[in-house]
Image (spheres, rainbow, N blue to C red):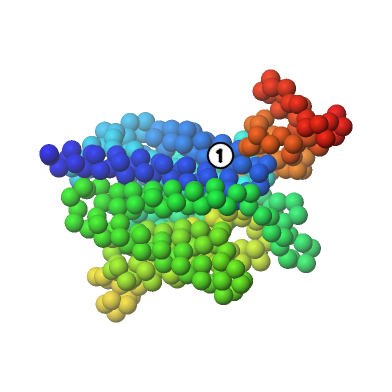
Amino acid sequence: MEVIHLNTIWVVIAAAMVLFMEGGFSLLEAGFVRTKNAVNVTMKIFVDLTIGALAFWVIGFAIMYGKDAFGLIGTSLFGGPEHIALSVDLPSAAYVLFQMGFAVACVSIVSGAVAERMSFKAYIVTVLAICVLVYPLSGHWIWNSEGWLAQLGMKDFAGSAAIHALGGFAAFAMARRLGARKGRFNSDGSANVFAPSNIPLASAGTFILWFGWFGFNAGSTLDATDASLGAIALHTMLAGAGGGTAALLLTMSKFGKADPSMTMNGVLAGLVAVTAGCAFVESWSAIVIGILAGIIVIYATLLVDRLKVDDPVGAVAVHGFNGVFGTIAVGLFDTTEGLFTTGDAKLLGVQALGAVTVVVWGLAAGHVLAVLCEKTVGLRVSEREEEEGLDMSFHGIPAYNELERFTDMPSNLYDFEETTGITVAPLPEKKAAAK
């Protein structure tokens, strides 16, 4: 079989794995938020996969991979990105599909951090802006061969900086502007814990994300015959395992319990951190990177809480902080240019510059986008909508067929009946409340 055929099969499968990660985001977020908002987070993921994918195809890909202007922005390929020349034996359509999965993943990071209180219209605007401009612009700097960070020699194999750090800090800025969910923080600065609605559901999401990450990282070879493909996949596994192990043991030591949500986020943190260097480090380095990421995610989560920024799923700690760490870790552990392996600090300096640049861009873009939504379609839902839950407010249907949850909220039942045409029969013992 010709190499181009093998590469096409491999990259299309890897792209499908990356896009399947959206199912993981959906289940993870639905499990971490409260029941009354589970449909809403799922619908936001559908916005990513529909509106976001189309927006990236029409405009975003061109800004990212089009003909370079001043190392800053692409200026060609608008509306027809399949007709491009690649340096590997691969049809351009397969490459565009793979990159579309990356764009959608970036915006999905924001979804979790703004959950339970963001207007659905504002989220649609957010998806458009990130997939059209915010992600493609910094992606051009890093991944377009003519981008200014690429020209400096920055290494980010599959996107610790380009995807995760950017998405994480854009999410931080938007969550900060949104404000916390009602009752999340006390006047003295202490935080109240909102218990996740379904830990097994969140764990299923984590497993799907972990599975998809092999396509995310190993697929970035774009070459089914690349000798490093197996090592990249192994490093992905080792870092995820290291992150989960560190988070599990640290929560047992620090809190006296093996915390499931922190363990899940520890796994994801390890995966995020190794994404930049999975092709450039040794196996032992991948384990160390994963372990450190599993520790970082816990203390970063506590820091975000102390800053009184409400992040229901821990997206900022997982993707933002560990995207930065993973980017810098390349400068430490890279087998040919790393500080720990060669004593040369040049790459470390470039990686640090790239990480800082992406953080600043993510914070600025997220803040401007939040203000823009605030002034136009509205950023935050009303107090009544937040109290009722965004499932009923925006979608007219609850996540689970347990309608007794809503029998003490007549307006919810009325909205459900009006929207769906289904008549709700209250439970016998709660008829009076439903009336």
Relative placement, left or right, of 116 versus 324 is right
Vertical relation: 294 (above or below) 18: below
| Residue 233 position by quadrant | bottom left
Q: Position of residue 13 (x, y in %)?
A: 30, 41
Q: Position of residue 228 (x, y in %)?
A: 22, 58
Q: What residue is disc 1 on?
A: 42
**Residue at (28% x, 43% y) in the render:** 11
Looking at the rendered image, the quarter that the C terminus falls into is top right
Residue most extreme to the front: 428
Number of numbered discs: 1
Identify the element where label 1 is drawn. helix
Label 1 environment density (alpha carbons within 10 Å; few <14, some 14–19, many ≥20): many
Relative placement, left or right, of 373 versus 80 is right
**Residue at (18% x, 50% y) in the render:** 225
| Residue 351 position by quadrant | bottom left
**Residue at (20% x, 45% y) in the render:** 88
Vertical relation: 144 (above or below) 281: above
Amino acid at pointer 1:
Thr
Looking at the rendered image, the quarter that the N terminus falls into is top left
Vertical relation: 303 (above or below) 102: below
Decide if residue 84 is in sight here: no
Residue most extreme to the bottom: 343
Residue sitting nearer the eye, 293 or 210:
210
Residue sitting nearer the eye, 265 or 163:
265
Residue most extreme to the right: 432
Residue most extreme to the top: 421
